[in-house]
Amino acid sequence: MRIADIRATTVTVPLQAPLRHSNGAHWGRFVRTIVEVETDTGLIGLGELGGGGESAEAAIRGLNAYLKGHDPFQLEALRFAITNPTASLYNNRTQLHAAIEFACLDVIGQHLGVPVYDLLGGKLRDQVPFASYLFFRYANDDGEGEVRTPEQLAAEAAELKRQYGFSVHKLKGGVFHPDYELECYRALADAVPGDRLRYDPNAALSVGQARRFGQAIADLPNDYLEDPTWGLNGMRQLRDLGIPLATNTVVVNLEQLATNVRDPAVDVILLDTTFWGGIRPCVKAAGVCETFQLGVAVHSSGELGIQLATMLHLGAVLPNLAYAADAHYHHLRDDVITGGLMSYQDGTIAVPNGPGLGVTLDRAKVAEYAELYKELGGYPYDRDPGRPDWYPLIPNDRWADPS
Ligand SMILES: [Mg+2]
């Protein structure tokens, strides 16, 4: 079996409302590039990556020159063919590699008639638990969905808990002054008594601010503080807070993981199937974390159903998954996979059991949202539609005004 063609289609799928974060916002929709790897035996494997729009499409199509004729089973060879670490100094293809790896695993699973989790060591759980992912949100075009005040945040958390059954809640912060976000976080805790909590300001706080924030929430049932300040050297200064520290920012490859083992800074490694370059690199990293007793969780960098499937197969096979996974998924209004949006039960999503990734494309939806992308184009993730000339510093002092 050989790769015969690699195709890419960029789509944009609406969100319930624009999601604000420390660097800007998701402007009311996600832009994702759907990758199809077709083999000479007629199988089509699916991959997905975010953000790049037309440039991601061109970059994926450009891999035809490298990978036509490649055997999709040869996954380690694939890694060196397109992400050799020295060549990557010029051409960093980590995220492209991830999308191709997803598609090759999907093809292998279809070829053998087994789910991807069976290629990764086998399924240890049938459902993966998820945290609610709470954002400060702008109102949508219908004037609905705003989350700005402590009251709105508390109401949103209670509603998500009622609708999806979440018992872990993550607040994406770094938007407003930390004193205001502290008030919001405590309101969240009051709204979901007994549930676990996480706060992720995307490294926007100074070490001092992060320390004060951590001290002020020490009485709450915190899973962890996620990237409370920038970098391993910043977070290492916060280890005495007594709250576990997590990152999806500065430990995103095995080299950085080794650094964190030799000179510990963070306790929980958030494994992102895209940022780490595929599902298999995440499984390798989880093995290192098991050895050194670091925590792991499944990270979300934004997803449609294909990427979500990669997160579910990863979550299914990790013995040391002691934390709920993150997903932006419940903010989506629709999906491009057959059957539409996957559903939550009691805060979990069932691991797909079909061959490969276990998801297939709804071609009509792909066409619809590819058309919408052509109409609307991309959006700058690192710009805030409410503050056109703004950009943040690290540590930030240019907070949004909550009033
Ligand atoms: Mg994060």
Image (cartoon, rainbow, N blue to C red):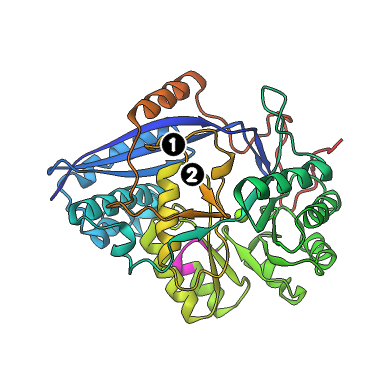
Q: Amino acid at mark 1?
A: Gly
Q: Amino acid at mark 2?
A: Glu
Asked whether, in this view, residue 307 is left or right of residue 217, the answer is left
**Residue in the picture at 82% in, 41% down:** 149
Figure quadrant of residue 55: top left
Q: Position of residue 403 (x, y in %)?
A: 87, 35
Question: Which residue is under mark 1?
Answer: 340
Q: In this picture, is 230 found above or below 309?
A: below
Q: Main secondary structure of the magenta part?
A: loop
Q: Camera-side residue: 146 or 251?
A: 146
Q: Mark 1 falls on what kind of element?
A: loop
Magenta stretch contains residue 4: no
**Quick check: is the Cβ at mark 2 less than 8 Å away from ligand 1?**
no
Question: Which residue is under mark 2?
Answer: 303
**Residue in the picture at 43% in, 61% down:** 126
Asked whether, in this view, residue 82 is left or right of residue 228, the answer is left
Ligand 1, by image quadrant, is bottom right
Q: Position of residue 398 (x, y in %)?
A: 79, 43
Magenta stretch contains residue 253: yes
Figure quadrant of residue 87: bottom left
**Residue in the picture at 71% in, 33% down:** 138
**Quick check: is the Cβ at mark 1 less than 8 Å away from ligand 1?**
no
Q: Which residues are magenta?
A: 251-255
Q: Camera-side residue: 120 or 238?
A: 120
Q: In this picture, is 218 found above or below 1?
A: below
Measure how far apart labels 1 and 2 are at the Cα level. Answer: 14 Å
